[in-house]
Amino acid sequence: MRKVLLVLLVSVVGLAAPQITPTPFRFGLIYWVDMNPLPLPRCYPSPAGIVANMFEFFGFPSPETIGEWWVPEKAEGADREALRAQLVAEGRLSPLGFLAPTLEPDTYWIIRPLKLGEREISPLVLMLFPDVELLNAELRNYMISGLFMPDGEWGCAELPWEPWICDLLGRNFPPTVFVAFVEITPEPFISWSIFHEIAHWVFHVWLEENGVPDELVPPLLLEGLARYTEAKVSATPEILVRCRELAAVWAQEGSLVDTPFPLIYEVGASLVEFLVQKMGWKEFLSALPSFILDWENYVAAWEPGWRAWLSTKISDQAQVLYQAELQLLGTCTAMVNPLFPEARKHVQEIRSTEDIVQFWNLLEGPVPGPSPELWAALERRELTFLHVAKALGREDLYSQALELLADLQKLREEGNWEKYVALFLRGVREIIGRVSETLEVPVP
């Protein structure tokens, strides 16, 4: 098979223009961002293998390609959307397919839909970044290590991505997974979150198949099912052990219906595992549309059994991990990494509440002096305060984040590094970590 390889340079605002290299993919298209394409068989875990296994897990056949996917047909036109409409009218492009720009001016690849049984589904765009830092920077969100978007209507309209992303994907862009490598050498290793994000895509297809709108799925189920599926398809049972442990801690003080955002992955996965053990996976999937349409009543009925199923023995380590999750320490670490690169290792080695206290004390220490790179790195992180406040569903924190961003902008314009950094770190502490609410041991 001869694969087509092109390099695109896409202009962006705020960051240097990334080099974008598209390559055809059995299930759609891969965009390699600021990195040379790697042979997919060398990449671990295998994106194609994950897709095939994920569809099988949900009871689907593996999607079939239409035509010679490795050599996409080309089409020319000055206006991408007008060209798309013309090709659809001529029958050369299914409404579920899409046009991908090439290096040649006004020239596009025709990426055809996939066949799933008797119906067509949209192909997948897999956008691969060389590291999580660049992914976070381009999406202006340091809460995430991966992201799935079912379509561009909401993403490009509502999210503050770097403009090149929507320019590249187009107005009618297909389901897209954003994920990064955690290591390139000696072997290319993709972030484990690729399982989670592809699980979201396949569940999206499953919802379409069963006539259930995405917006009806409650976050606890959406993220819990993706985490459960991630653990099963990746054959990583320790993920579910951790979920059960953290859910057991939460069950001591809260319920399923009021699970806070930082815990919906773990608590949701524990609920899915409880139901699957009780019903069986196929039976669970069969009943899932009914569960979604009457979620609150079902959750109330499940709650006593779920609590009894959870382990009553909670380890000290589980208590510490619970507190770290509640404070979103992973996000906090990503936010302060330019100032305190040692913070990441500290969080990875947390074993006690005192270690969490020491993390916050670390942020009280001296910071490096200003540089253009540090100013830019922190500015890219500012919108994450809003992302966190919105995810937490806290209007008070959202208002506080808006005020914080206005004050940070003013200090940036004044070039007042000392006050800017102090205010930035206060935001990490008060909006993201919510230390006064979540830390059991007072921080000096």
Image: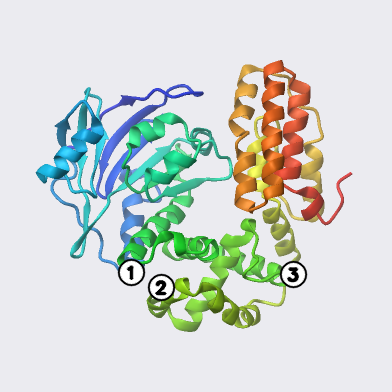
Residue ID at (70%, 46%): 397
Give how far across and how far down residue 340 sits, in percent. Answer: 70, 33
N-terminal-most mark, 2 or 3: 3
- Judged by depth in the image, the label closer to the viewer, 1 or 3, is 1
Distance from label 1 to label 3 (Cα)?
Answer: 36 Å
Amino acid identity at mark 2: Pro
Q: CA distance from mark 1 to mark 2?
A: 7 Å
Residue under circle 1?
Answer: 210
Q: Dot 3 corresponds to which residue?
A: 253
Q: Which of the image's four quarters has the C terminus?
A: top right
Taking 257 as reference, is 292 left or right? left
Work out whether mark 1 precedes mark 2 in sequence or the reverse, and give the earlier one: 1
Q: Can you tell which mark lies on residue 289?
A: 2
Give the residue type that dot 3 points to: Glu
Could you tell me which residue is drawn at 44 percent across and 40 percent down? Answer: 157
Which secondary structure lies at badge 2? helix
**Vertical relation: 383 (above or below) 303:** above
Measured in 3D between alpha carbons, the distance from the residue under mark 2 to the one under mark 3, in whole angstroms, is 29 Å
Density class for disc 2 (Cα within 10 Å; few <14, some 14-19, many ≥20) is: some
Q: Which is more foreground, mark 2 or mark 3?
A: 2
Task: Look at the numbered discs 1 and 2 and tell me whether their residues touch, using CB distance below 8 Å.
Answer: yes
Q: Position of residue 277 (x, y in %)?
A: 50, 80
105 or 294: nearer the viewer: 294
202 relative position to 28: left or right = right
Instruction: State the residue lying farthest toward the left.
Output: 90
- Disc 1 crowd rating (10 Å Cα; few below 14, some 14-19, many 20+) is few
The mark that comes first in sequence, 1 or 3, is 1
